[in-house]
Amino acid sequence: MKYMSTRGRVSGIAFKDAVMMGLADDGGLLIPEQIPDVRAHLEAWRRLDYVSFAQQVLRLFIDDIAHEVLDGLVADAYASFSEPDVVRFAEVGDVTVLELFHGPTLAFKDVALQLLGGLFAHILAERGGHLNILGATSGDTGSAAIAGVRGRPGIDIVILFPQGRVSPLQELQMTTVPDANVHCVAVEGSFDDCQSIVKSIFSDLPFKQRYSLGAVNSVNWARVLAQVVYYGYTSLRFDKAPAFCVPTGNFGNIFAGYMAHRMGFPIERFILATNANDILARFFATGDYARGSVHHTHSPAMDIQVASNFERYLFYLLGEDAGRVRTFFENFTRTGSASTGAPPKDPLFLATAVDNVSTEATIRSVHQRHGYVADPHTAVGLQAASRFPDVRPLVCVGTAHPAKFPEVVDAVLGEGAARHPALDALRGKPTRRVVVPASEDAVKAILRQLGD
Ligand SMILES: *Cc1c(COP(=O)(O)O)cnc(C)c1O
């Protein structure tokens, strides 16, 4: 399997090179040159456990890592999950919640980042060299990325976060990690400052090369691929093809579902659920993709105005025409908006936006009626699911453990409503972090000390 860019100027890329490239060199996103058809395998695959199923799916997309080696990487990635079969299903009324948050940091990002960490380590061991991962986080991504690479030889990770503006628990999930290759950096500024520092360091190409900088953001194809697995796996547990409701920000998680559908897994439709940052819901209603200002909501991991994975979907929506994709995103970069001219004629997607008040009401009512404690991101999905009562059977993707967001969950359900022993154990542990001013030079100085 080879990979190509949505912007048409990069193609014939092997999987391992796609993993190391992240963003395609022409500014587009990497996608497989052909989408594998799984329909002939479905009967046999129904009987597999999660890890065996993941191994089969990944083999279709990866032909430059020997099967036994790949199988080992997959098994290792999911050995860190507390659920014996990696994911767990919870019946919440007439909706099935697919709980993806039983990994080391209790958010669904572990499903992809545990595998990506192993892939990076494997590729570096083979090719030699060192990787300095640089990223910015407002919460979930940082701790999941750190958990994916902590202690791995050949890799250092530097994560920036805005000082005093990350939830105390999420900060502890990063700063209590004792491994010497983990560097937590509190920036005296906002999350936007952190992001713009990262962006401007990555755009300094000589510096990027000299210090072997790598990214772990959700544009990496390996992250999407790891997420395709749970859509396929779940779809085979139903007699009738289910729909999926996905709380999304970057369109990463839901794009993986779309890919699973294109591969021939029995998936009926998708309900796309955003919070008040509704750029994606607006696109599906109008065909206009227009940047707004970022609203801070109860579901901070979805407080995103530019959905980095949306470009992959748009490529297929625009008839796989890389020229049209290029024009669309050139317009968007220049003016902050772009349009397909009309609402997309894609019956596969329904979309809706959920505000903070409805998120709280959903946490309350789901608990009252079904005894289920949902985190605010999953609650956005459950609220969206309730708006489309005819779309059944329906799987709502559960993206975080509620104990990660006590500020919201406890305020609605009462003190201590959501606890997890792994989070309780963090309190009082020694922490490590450095504090720097919001300047590119201060962060570059840290990277220079790590060397190349
Ligand atoms: C990252 C994240 C999301 C959004 O995922 P996308 O891939 O950006 O759609 C939703 N919920 C939680 C808890 C997350 O950490």
Image: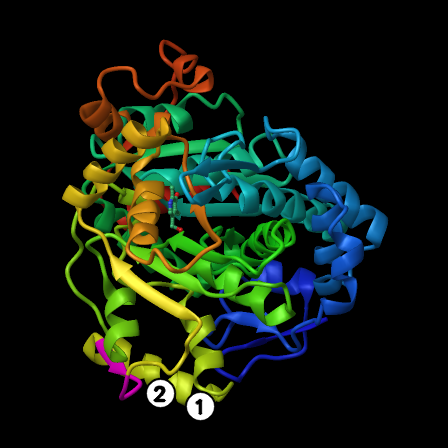
**Dividing the picture into quarters, in which one does residue 5 lie?**
bottom right
Mark 2 secondary-structure assignment? helix
Residue appearing at x 73%, y 53% in the figure: 127
Mark 1 secondary-structure assignment? helix
When the figure is inspected, residue 430 is found, relative to residue 162, above or below; the finding is above
Residue 128 seen in the current view:
no
Residue 189 seen in the current view:
yes
When the figure is inspected, residue 316 is found, relative to residue 213, above or below; the finding is below
Residue wearing tag 2: 327
Mark 1: amino acid: Gly
**Dividing the picture into quarters, in which one does residue 342 lie?**
bottom left
Mark 2: amino acid: Thr
Q: Is residue 272 magenta?
A: no
Residue appearing at x 31%, y 29% in the figure: 367
In the displayed structure image, the side of residue 270 where residue 118 appears, left or right: right
Stretch of the chain drawn in magenta: 337-342
Contact, CB < 8 Å: mark 2 with mark 1? yes
Residue appearing at x 24%, y 78% in the figure: 286
In the displayed structure image, the side of residue 229 where residue 62 appears, left or right: right
| Mark 2 → mark 1, Cα distance in angstroms | 6 Å
**How far across and how far down the image is residue 283, in percent?**
27, 73
Q: Nearer the viewer, residue 92 or 144?
A: 92
Residue wearing tag 1: 323
